[in-house]
Image (cartoon, helix red, strand yellow):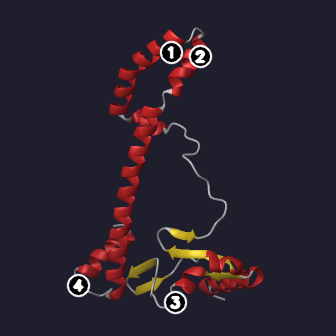
Amino acid sequence: MLPRQSVISTIEQLQSELDLHDIWRIKNPTIPSFTWSQSNPLVFSRLDNWLISNSLSDNVYTVDMISAIEFQDVNDKVEGPGFWKLNCSLLNDKQYVDEVNLRLPAWLQKGKQELSDPRSVWDWVKYNKKYSRQCSMGKSRLRKLEEWQLNKEFQEASFVFQNNPRANGQGSACLALLSGV
């Protein structure tokens, strides 16, 4: 048996034994899609399978090649900001470090005015994480926006290429984008 046929057979056996279904294909029965291609010879293939239990199929709200699976009606929703810890990459941001260094004396002074134990003062300084949290969340928002924009451009290029992979100019540019060139 050829390696590709062996892999397909193994996946089909796994699906059968565990009652799994490719939710992408169920939710997108008419959309031609692929996650891998080559230009010579022209070959398109899906390398991924979103296999989920048949019992979960009705709870799948959307499935996407980029953002994966999104469920609806999940009862275990977490609310509130949750636990936050410092993103250490902020320490490489000169603007952030300079701003913390400017604010630190005021935080120390206020802590020393209200607290006598140096350990409590140190805890007070750490408690003033609001600035760090705001910086971290701002950077995260910008990173997510950039990722969203890149995903959108990728999906548009994929759509153009899937609908006309042999088109002059556009097709080769899309293939370059899809292959990471």
What residue did someone put label 3 on?
29
In which image quadrant can residue 144 be found? bottom left
The disc labelled 3 sits on which kind of residue? Answer: Pro
Please rate how many residues cluster around mark 4, counting C-alpha atoms within 10 Å: few if below 14, some from 14 to 19, many from 20: few
User: Could you say whether the residue bearing mark 4 is in a helix, strand or loop?
Assistant: loop
What residue did someone put label 2 on?
120
User: Could you say whether the residue bearing mark 3 is in a helix, strand or loop?
Assistant: loop
**For residue 142, above or below residue 71:** above
User: Could you say whether the residue bearing mark 2 is in a helix, strand or loop?
Assistant: helix
Sequence-first disc among 3 and 4: 3
What residue did someone put label 4 on?
168
- Nearest the viewer among 11 and 156 is 156
Mark 4 → mark 1, Cα distance in angstroms = 67 Å
Mark 4 → mark 2, Cα distance in angstroms = 68 Å
In the rendered view of the protein, which quadrant contains the C terminus? Answer: bottom left
The disc labelled 2 sits on which kind of residue? Answer: Ser
